[in-house]
Amino acid sequence: MNRPNVVNCFSEALALIFKPGFRIFILAPIALNIFIFLILSYAALHYAQTAFSHFETSIPDWLVWIKWLLWPLLILIILIIYGYSFNLFTTIIAAPFLGLLAEKVEQSVTGIAPTDEPWIQLIPRTFKRELIKLIYFIPRSLGIFLLVVLLILVPGANIVGGILGGLWSCWCLALQFCDYPADNHRISFEQVRTQLGQQKINTFAFGSIVLCGSMVPIINIFITPLSVAAGTIFWLEQNKK
């Protein structure tokens, strides 16, 4: 199995998605991203203010001395949740477009289209795949979230909680965006997890780039189509014979 250069994958993807023929596959996810961005940004600001107010009033006296450390950690966790949620909602709603984008990228890179599937079959297939991923992501994400909350309350372990939450988000995002080309080739989600698990450093590096881009307003509007293209190139390089 080959080991792709993650930075090169994103560089190639950035150059590729602005070529003629990609506009419809880029504009549709971006339009959805703008809509989701406005809703989630409003919700994030509202709940962040609530969380900060609660944090100020509920922090115990024995933790006052590390308050300066807990503040940036709380902000980081909110940003991680914001970035992860943004990608989650976008990828579910735009799943058919993103599958087509991965197909278009693969055809541009290799000269061969993976499938010639009509919309009536593509749409239910992509939504079924998203459901499979949600069944994997949601219970584990809830478990990680509860563990992170518990670690934050333990002196000295709060940094570990932030790191753990970030690593889990990176893993989920790498799985999400590298799965589109695999799904186009009818490769099971379990097999995709196994492949990415064999290249943990590259996988977490890929996910970290997506997560960082997802945390930044405006940039996160464009991160979804870019990540699909980069994930497709990453998967093609990984499976190149």
Image: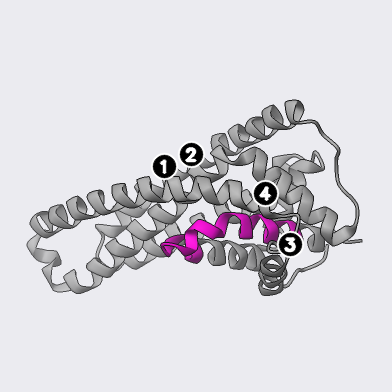
Secondary structure state at the residue bearing disc 4: helix
**What kind of residue is marked 4?**
Phe
Tag 2 residue: 138
Rendering coords of residue 89 (x, y %): 49, 42
Tag 1 residue: 142
> Can you tell which of label 4 and label 1 is closer to the viewer?
4
Query: Mark 2 and mark 3: span between their CA atoms?
Result: 25 Å
**What kind of residue is marked 3?**
Phe
| Residue 25 - label | 4
Q: Is residue 208 above or below residue 118?
A: below
> Can you tell which of label 2 and label 4 is closer to the viewer?
4
Between 78 and 158, the one nearer to me in the picture:
78
Q: Earlier in the sequence, mark 2 or mark 4?
A: 4
Rendering coords of residue 227 (x, y %): 62, 58
Between 99 and 65, the one nearer to me in the picture:
99
Q: Earlier in the sequence, mark 2 or mark 3?
A: 2
The residues colored magenta run 212-233
Rendering coords of residue 45 (x, y %): 26, 54
Tag 3 residue: 234
Q: Earlier in the sequence, mark 4 or mark 1?
A: 4
Q: Is residue 230 left or right of residue 240?
A: left
Secondary structure state at the residue bearing disc 3: helix
Within-10-Å neighbours for mark 1: few <14, some 14–19, many 20+:
few
Q: Which quadrant would the C terminus be assigned to in this image? A: bottom right
Query: Mark 2 and mark 4: span between their CA atoms?
Result: 27 Å
